[in-house]
Amino acid sequence: MPESMGSEYAFERMKENENFLQSHLEQIEIIELINDAIDCVRPKTKNADSWIKSSKHFFLHPILLPSSYAINTHLLTGNLPACFRELRFLFESLAFCHYAEKEFPDEEFFIEQLKNYEKIRKSGKPQKTISQLLVNLGEDTGLKSELNQVYGRLSNDWVHTLGFAKKVVDLTSANSQLPSWAWILPIGFDEKDLPTINELNDYIAIFRKLLEKTIAINEDKF
């Protein structure tokens, strides 16, 4: 690897991007999500069995906390597409773990909740898709309209190949150059990246609301 692309170069870009975000955003939602994750993983009970039994607890530890930090790392290196893709995983995992625990509350091991729920999800006629789980969770939490819009855009614009290609073309046409994250990484942000950064910030804010409301459902049993 050329010296210019080593760890020193990456650190400089990350510091530049951190300063850029602090100067252009009133609140950096991914930092708030990390704080939320830390608060959530603090044990709500001294009974260790509940952490083995609960799919929601599984979501909090190896999914929510590391993925929140991963989004922040991607953001600081200018890797905006990876931020959106990781966020989509958080939406999907929260919904799946919530309904797995709801449907199979008496299982003694969270993996059995997840396996059993996957079976009934796929055996339905028609099968219940992950997007349908989010529709249901949106109804249960009062966030249906926001979730429908966000999840569709996360999928179509940042995960599906054709949608992502259109996103790159549209941004290139609007700015007369490729988006910064389509060049090389790490890379520093500039003003042309602000609409995409604000889009991510807004989506994370919606996820934070969903997380709070979902955790609050049957919290006495959680």
Image (cartoon, rainbow, N blue to C red):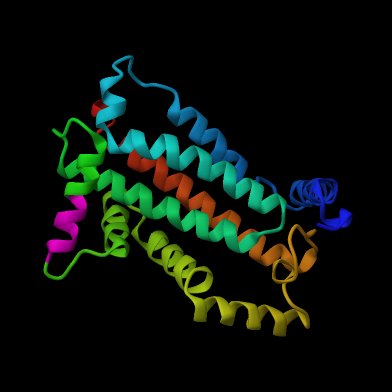
In magenta, the rendered stretch is 117-124
Observer-nearest of 183 and 197: 183
Q: Where is the C terminus found, in terms of image quarters?
A: top left
- In the picture, residue 100 is in which quadrant? top left
Q: In this image, 93 relative to 203: left or right?
A: left
211 versus 179 height, above or below = above
Residue 69, how many percent across, how many down? 58, 42
189 versus 29 height, above or below = below
Residue at left offset 13%, top offset 33%: 106
Residue 198, how many percent across, how many down? 64, 59
Q: In this image, 115 relative to 151: left or right?
A: left
Q: Where is the N terminus found, in terms of image quarters?
A: bottom right
Outermost right residue: 3
Magenta stretch encompasses residue 68: no
Q: In this image, 73 relative to 24: left or right?
A: left
Observer-nearest of 1 and 92: 1
Residue at left offset 42%, top offset 63%: 151
Outermost front residue: 1
Residue at left offset 44%, top offset 28%: 41
176 versus 126 height, above or below = below
Magenta segment main secondary structure:
helix
Residue 66, how many percent across, how many down? 52, 40
196 versus 136 height, above or below = below
Residue 216, how many percent across, how many down? 33, 35
Outermost top residue: 46
Number of numbered tags placed on the structure image: 0
Residue at left offset 45%, top offset 63%: 150
- In the picture, residue 110 is in which quadrant? top left
